[in-house]
Image: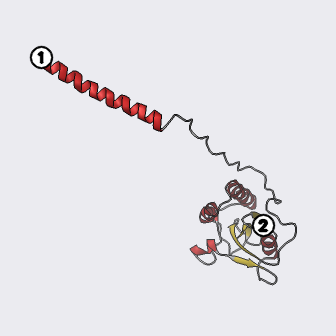
Amino acid sequence: MPSRGQKNKLIGIGGVIAAVLLGGAVGLLVYNPFEPPPPPPPKIDLNMPYDDAWGRLTSPDAEAVVTHILVSWTGANPRAKPKQPRTKEEARKLIDQIWAMYRHTPTPENWKSLQEQYNEDNEGGPQSAFNKYTCKANDGLDPKFSATGKSTRSKHARITESAFGFHLIRRE
């Protein structure tokens, strides 16, 4: 059985602990008043229908610098090798989904991440995913690719089809 002095010592220690805990709780409320958590980010609707009007200029510019994401399909072109076997219909669905992901967050960081993940432009090695192309008269590029690049607003992206597959073209 603890003595009276030991009881007082235990009560004193318990009081100090209680005061520290109570003080900490009050401090949290004073300096960090309760706020509801932020809402979750909006979900990306991957089935959003492609809207070619998003970012389309009313008349094309004479020149534009673009980057792209190529999604091909099995047998489309021997120079374009899909990362996995897919049909033309599956490639179209995938490029539409990539467009929806970019439109949801149209930032340079998101674009680069999407290029790293999806771009099948492997003609020039791993860094070809980030190639920049200048679309202009007699540029040697696929005519649809060049026309889409020149008729897209800066920081927007639009889809076109070429002999290599589907391109999501983003104007710099």
Is tag 1's residue or tag 2's residue first in the polypeptide sequence? 1
Q: Amino acid at mark 2?
A: Arg
Q: Horizontal and vertical percent for residue 60? A: 84, 72
For label 2, the SS is loop
Question: Residue 138 occupies which quadrant of the picture?
Answer: bottom right
Q: Nearer the viewer, mark 1 or mark 2?
A: 1
At a point 57% along the width and 35% down the height, the residue shown is: 36
At a point 69% along the width and 75% down the height, the residue shown is: 78
Cα–Cα gap, marks 1 and 2: 84 Å
Q: Amino acid at mark 1?
A: Ser
Question: Residue 116 occupies which quadrant of the picture?
Answer: bottom right
Question: Residue 83 occupies which quadrant of the picture?
Answer: bottom right
User: Disc number at residue 3?
Assistant: 1
For label 1, the SS is loop
Q: Is residue 79 left or right of residue 143?
A: left
Residue beneath disc 2 = 153
